[in-house]
Image (tube, grey):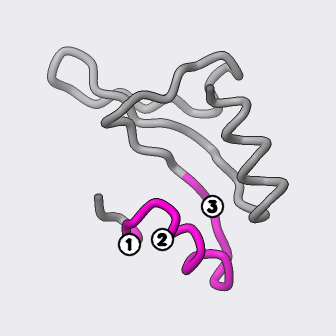
Amino acid sequence: MYGDAFADLKTRHNVLLVGISKESEGERQLLKLPPDDTRIELGDYLIMIVNGATEKVIAGMFRIKEGAF
């Protein structure tokens, strides 16, 4: 759930989760600061604000680089 991910990323890594991009009917929909009970599903993009030191940890955790999947 979005609220759980928000709290975990903020507490553990000082990352601010600001939204999710979800696919709906073949198009992407941006949800800015969605409700805590929003389900994060396979294929969703998480939109985060990170600092330089945390970027490497997050990139390794999600196995991505900035702007890539």
In magenta stretch: residue 41: no
Range drawn in magenta: 48-66
| Disc with the residue nearer the chain's start (3 vs 1) | 3
Viewer-side label of 3, 1: 1
User: Residue at coordinates 28% horizontally, 31% vertically from top-left?
Assistant: 28
* Residue on which disc 1 sits: 65
Instruction: Tell me the element at label 2.
Output: helix
Q: CA distance from mark 1 to mark 2?
A: 5 Å
Question: The disc labelled 1 sits on which kind of residue?
Answer: Lys
Q: Which part of the image, by quadrant, shows the C terminus?
A: bottom left
Residue 19 place in picture, x, y as percent: 56, 39
Residue 66 place in picture, x, y as percent: 41, 70
* Residue on which disc 2 sits: 59
Question: The disc labelled 2 sits on which kind of residue?
Answer: Ala
In magenta stretch: residue 52: yes
Q: Do labels 1 and 2 touch, CB within 8 Å?
A: yes
Numbered circle sitting on residue 49: 3
User: Residue at coordinates 50% horizontally, 29% vertically from top-left?
Assistant: 40
**Residue 31 to residue 24: above or below:** below
**Residue 45 to residue 31: above or below:** below
Question: The disc labelled 3 sits on which kind of residue?
Answer: Ile
Q: CA distance from mark 2 to mark 3?
A: 12 Å
Judge from the rendering whether residue 19 lies leftward or rightward of residue 44; answer left or right.
Answer: right
